[in-house]
Image: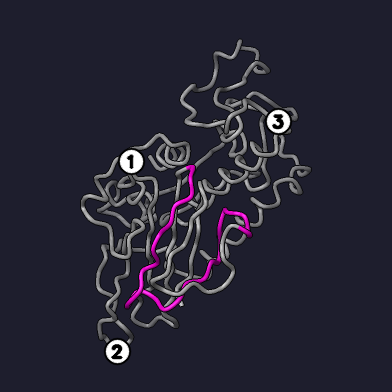
Amino acid sequence: RFRNYVRDFWRGNTHGVADLAQRLVGSPDIFADRAPEASINFVTAHDGFTLRDLVTYDVKHNGANGEDNRDGTDDNRSWNCGVEGETEDGHVNALRHRQAQNLVATLLLSNGVPMITAGDELGRTQQGNNNAYCQDSPISWLHWDTAQEWGDLTDLTRRLLQLRAEHPVFRRTAYRHGEPLLDPTGQPTGRKNLAWFGGAPHEMTADDWHDGTRRTLGIYLAEDHPERAQDAAFLVWLHAGSDPIRVALPDGPWAHTYTVVATSAQEHELPGDKLPAGSHLDLPGRCVVVLQVD
């Protein structure tokens, strides 16, 4: 369920963002009677396309398997970004890198247990083969010579794993439902431990949730452990639309300022300085942006 929806979201084949919200918080619609760790999240696995191939091929290319391309699934939910297979087109390759980073970011920022297929963080390819179990050849081997070309993907993967390790808010052991956030003395802060934003300065409305054309979602996560060492909070934006969009950064009790700490966007596309709460942020097309609350 996680794999199929996340793939569809980033290739533009979903209805609204309500399902995305469920996947981001550990799929409570499926595992409500269990802990979030019951949700084993993945975008790719040992069979099927690799992450790089997921953004490079629309269809399988399994001719080398000797079955006239009949083997392997046809339900890949992939998008080649405009050209089938490898290309020297710089614009297409930049989009592929962005989409691969978006998929990894969604995986690593979601509650539950993330499963990463070895080599995906290095841009591993099986040349469009989605059923390489029968291959003991360069098609199925993990090649380290892709590391430099796909270093941006490796760097973002490393950064997000670091954030996940340092901040328990990204790996909660129990579901949250937007309960009021209390300070260490038990007094309300005016914030919640989980909140959803759609680009306006207020939380998502019922109409926002039912908008089938919506391609943008913001999730606010605040650490709520009574004995927490710090009031860590983050606002994560996921924008799958092809065009830039302007979003409001919640103010009042939500934050004083925001700082970009990880993103799939290019460095020049986002401000490097602290952003005042109540200001606006222009999200580039097809990107994930992680803002730390100050």
Identify the magenta region. 242-268
| Label 2 environment density (alpha carbons within 10 Å; few <14, some 14–19, many ≥20) | few
- On the rendered structure, is 67 left or right of 30? right
Q: Quadrant of the N terminus?
A: top left
The spot of residue 35 in percent (x, y) is 33, 57
Question: CA–CA distance between discs 2 and 3?
Answer: 58 Å
Q: Residue furthest left?
A: 206
Secondary structure under the numbered disc 1 in the rendered image: loop
Which residue bears the numbered disc 3?
87
Does residue 133 sit above or below 280 in this rendering?
A: above
Rendered image: mark on residue 213? 1
Of discs 1 and 3, which sits in the foreground? 1
Rendered image: mark on residue 185? 2
Secondary structure under the numbered disc 3 in the rendered image: loop
Question: CA–CA distance between discs 1 and 3?
Answer: 31 Å
| Label 3 environment density (alpha carbons within 10 Å; few <14, some 14–19, many ≥20) | few
Residue 251, magenta (yes or no)? yes
The spot of residue 263 in percent (x, y) is 55, 58
Write down the quadrant of residue 82 in the picture. top right
Task: Name the residue rendered at 72%, 35% in the picture.
Answer: 141
Question: CA–CA distance between discs 2 and 1?
Answer: 43 Å
Of discs 2 and 3, which sits in the foreground? 3
Q: Nearer the viewer, residue 291 or 184?
A: 291
**Amino acid type at image mark 1:** Thr
Instruction: Give the number of marks.
Output: 3
